[in-house]
Image (tube, helix red, strand yellow):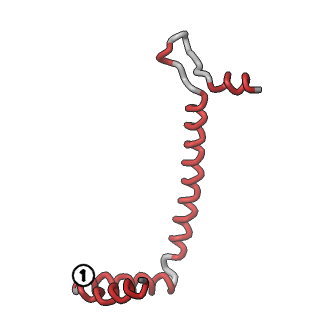
Amino acid sequence: MSQHTDDQKRPVNISGNEEYAHNYDDVERYLQANLEVENNRQYIENSEEQIAGLKHSTAVDLFQKQVGLLQKRLVDDPTFFQQMFISEGSGAI
């Protein structure tokens, strides 16, 4: 059993040239990485579809407006949130 496993991990020598030797582990990791990329691509596409579907919902629209107002307030007056951060930090301690 151990001999069979060791044989799979030995480099494959193509044309008797050491420069072209490949390791089965490298090929296996390469194929696994490609499979993971494809699986993640499908996951990302599904997530993008969900985002597109939710983008115009009332709750998301309200949330985006609130975030926009907070960003505008922070840009206009950066010290506005200073006391809030101090209070929350003190409360956490």
Locate residue 47, reporting x and y percent. Answer: 55, 65
Label 1 sits on what residue type? Answer: Val
21 relative position to 73: left or right: right
Q: Is residue 19 in view?
A: yes
> 59 or 70, which lies in front?
70
Q: Image point 58% across, 48% down: which residue?
A: 36
Q: Residue furthest top?
A: 16
Who is closer to the viewer here, 56 or 65? 65
Give the residue drawn at x 22%, y 85%: 76
Seen in the picture, residue 16 relative to 81 is either above or below; the reply is above
Which element is circle 1 on?
helix
- Residue beneath disc 1: 75
Question: In the orientation shown, which residue stands out farthest toward the right?
Answer: 1
Question: Is residue 68 positioned above or below 42 on the image?
Answer: below
Q: In this view, does 57 lie to the left or right of 84?
A: right
x%, y% of residue 42?
58, 55
- Answer yes or no: is residue 69 visible: no
Q: Which residue is drawn at 36% across and 89% down?
A: 87
Q: Position of residue 32 (x, y in %)?
A: 60, 41
Which image quadrant for residue 88? bottom left
- Local crowd size for mark 1, using a 10 Å CA cut-off: few (<14), some (14–19), many (≥20): few
Q: In which quarter of the image is the C terminus?
A: bottom left
Q: Horizontal placement of 51 versus 90: left or right?
A: right
Residue 48's place in the image compared with 55, above or below, is above
Residue 70 left/right relative to 33: left
**Residue occupying the point 53% across, 76% down:** 54
| Count of number-bearing discs | 1
Residue 46 percent coordinates (x, y): 58, 62
- Which quadrant would residue 83 be assigned to in this image? bottom left
